[in-house]
Image (tube, rainbow, N blue to C red):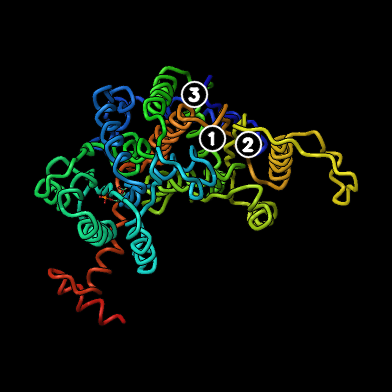
Amino acid sequence: EHIKLSVDKTLSFVSREEIFKFKEESKKHLTALHEGTGKGNDYTGWVELPSQITAEELKDIQETANNLKERVEVLVVIGIGGSYLGAKAVNDALANNFDMLQADNENPLVLYAGQNISEDYLYELMEILENIEFGICVISKSGTTTEPALAFRLLKELLEEGVGKEEAKERIVAITDESKGALRTLADQEGYKTFIIPDNVGGRYSVLTPVGLLPIAVAGHDITKLVEGAKSMQKYTSETNFEENPALLYAATRNALYAKGKEIEILANYNPKLHNIAEWWKQLYGESEGKELKGIFPASVDLTSDLHSMGQYIQEGQRNIFETVISVAKTKYKVVIPEDKDNLDKLNFLAGKRVDEVNKMAELGTQLAHVDGGVPNLRIELPELNEFYIGELLYFFEIACGVSGYILDVNPFDQPGVEAYKSNMFALLEKPGFEEETKKIKERL
Ligand code: PA5
């Protein structure tokens, strides 16, 4: 069994022909991704990654995770963008909703830093960490990104002051480039355990490298099953013909909708555990496609929560949106709605039913309402929320993103636009080397 994609509820907006128009092209792009012959081909190392990860690599990651588990109650993952979103997405999808409140002696709680520059965030984090046994997994491919470097400088000092330099060394793992960047130099100098982010894998495609796998293993999830899921989707999408191939169909359908003026895609879920899968997906698609004045804008909602906030807009606002729903077929637990003798809330008609039945009818009712309101709907179904199907989902989205970006005729593996804010920030902060920019920017203020 695989995750399933259904595009039926888009067919009153685009015809089968309009989707199938991309059939040959999308197959060609898939081949280009596998053969490394398309745009940005020096960054397509992630395409064959699931089938290339070796048992030894997984073992090394697991052993490092086990070493951290023995020493710490909290692991702070320091990274930004592609260097933390994948780990957070998977960890949240697989964790108990209330992990924060549960004493679990086996698996450290994974927290995140270096994904913002909020002084209060860092202060409050350090205040908590002062009384906790903690470790750090610092992740930066370039090794020079400001946000994580700043957080690492602070937390490294705090850790060394707390447990001494020798023990701190045992609790710090660095994931970075094989030879370049400040983090590589520092890690080698201090003797940290390190993992390499391959040169040909960009940040937002790196969840199945140690970038994602180490923090996921520390949180106690099964990284072997996650990789198995990704591998199963790698095989499935490379062998299946267009009609049944979820990645090709997804890429083709969203481009057919885009051609009809549907410029915003909302990723919707009915399970709060998927919130950060959407955050990861937004980076993947936004950074891959939003360039050269083109690209579908990726947005997301958590339902049914946001039906009480964004629902109005989706139903009746501008008709430039389409929606992709991620649905989980089977819940992990069972909660049955009780009978109430007074029935003041008039809910006795639901007595004896599972909560998930109500959720599923909310989902179906919403889908029909949105389609009636002019919002085409795609639906991705996961048989259940576990490592294997999350692995399938991640790879499905990645490979579909590569194909979709090629259909759009952009390089889905670069992000030149990310630099603009950095050079302004450095100019404003008077970073050495930015004297000219500083002068110019100050004149504008
Ligand atoms: O997708 C990307 O490449 C970016 O979002 C990066 O992941 C992000 O900027 C972090 O970069 P680095 O890992 O070099 O610190």
Is residue 287 in view? Answer: yes
Q: Nearer the viewer, residue 280 or 242?
A: 280
Q: Secondary structure at mark 2?
A: helix
In this rendering, would 49 be left or right of 99?
left
Q: Residue at x 44, y 39 (%)?
A: 90
Residue 11: x and y, percent?
64, 33
Determine which quarter of the picture holds residue 228.
top left
Residue 342: x and y, percent?
90, 48
Sequence-wise, the earlier of marks 3 and 2 is 2
Q: Are marks 1 and 2 in contact (CB under 8 Å)?
A: yes
Q: Indicate which label's residue lies in the foreground, 3 or 1.
A: 3
Residue beneath label 1, please? 253
Ligand 1 within 8 Å of disc 2? The answer is no
- Seen in the picture, residue 355 relative to 162 is either above or below; the reply is above
Quadrant housing the C terminus: bottom left
In this rendering, would 331 be left or right of 215?
right
In the displayed orientation, state which residue is furthest to the left: 189
Q: Nearer the viewer, residue 400 or 87?
A: 87
Q: Residues within 10 Å of mark 2 (few under 14, many from 20)?
A: many
Residue 413: x and y, percent?
31, 42
In this rendering, would 439 be left or right of 348?
left
What is the CA distance from the residue labelled 3 to the residue labelled 1?
A: 12 Å
Residue 235: x and y, percent?
40, 19
Residue beneath label 3, please? 245
- Seen in the picture, residue 330 relative to 408 is either above or below; the reply is above
Q: Secondary structure at mark 3?
A: loop
What is the CA distance from the residue labelled 1 to the residue labelled 2?
A: 8 Å
Sequence-wise, the earlier of marks 1 and 2 is 2
Q: Nearer the viewer, residue 286 or 101?
A: 101
